[in-house]
Image (spheres, helix red, strand yellow):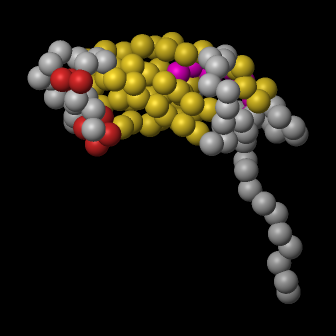
Amino acid sequence: EEGAERLQFLSGEPFALRVAVAAHDGATPPRLQLELRDDAGTLVAGEAVDLAALGWSASNGQQGIRFEIGSLPLADGRFHLRLGLTDETGERLYHQLDDALVFVVYPGGEERGVVRFAGSWTLEEK
């Protein structure tokens, strides 16, 4: 929330990732891919965004891209974030950072496991 760079989070806290993307003038807008893996290398989540849809342009020089999660759905563990830039189809890889960010999530309460199950229980009427 304070905007400070951190490598430790409580489960359920807000999470934001800022990435700077730059390319030669005239380059077509790439796709930014994000993969989240646990310490064992298991894929936990993946996301991709077409930077053209965000209005990104190589002629603007280096531009910041922000990805936000209002409530971190991770419960407990050490996680590795991989970032990649591809062409607009996602087939041609331009650049990849395997451990762009390594961070730890601690349980904020009674959570167990890797993913936080954020649901609610109700009693149904007969």
Point out the image quarter for the C terminus.
bottom right
Q: How many marks?
A: 0
Give the residue drawn at x 67%, y 31%: 1
The answer to whether residue 52 shows anywhere in this view is yes
Give the residue drawn at x 24%, y 24%: 60
Q: Quadrant of residue 52?
A: top left
Q: Considering only vertical position in the picture, is 13 above or below 86?
A: below
In this view, the residue farthest toward the bottom is: 126
In this view, the residue farthest toward the left is: 26
Front-most of residues 51 and 91: 51
Main SS, magenta region, reads: strand
Q: Is residue 64 left or right of residue 76?
A: left
Give the residue drawn at x 83%, y 69%: 122
Give the residue drawn at x 66%, y 36%: 14
The answer to whether residue 92 shows anywhere in this view is no
Q: In this view, does 103 lie to the left or right of 57?
A: right
Q: In this view, does 118 lie to the left or right of 67?
A: right
The image position of residue 110, as x and y in percent, is: 88, 39
Q: Quadrant of residue 64?
A: top left
The image position of residue 61, as x and y in percent, is: 25, 19
The magenta segment is 75-81
Whether 80 is among the magenta residues is yes
The image position of residue 4, as x and y in percent, is: 64, 20
The image position of residue 118, as x and y in percent, is: 73, 50
Whether 15 is among the magenta residues is no
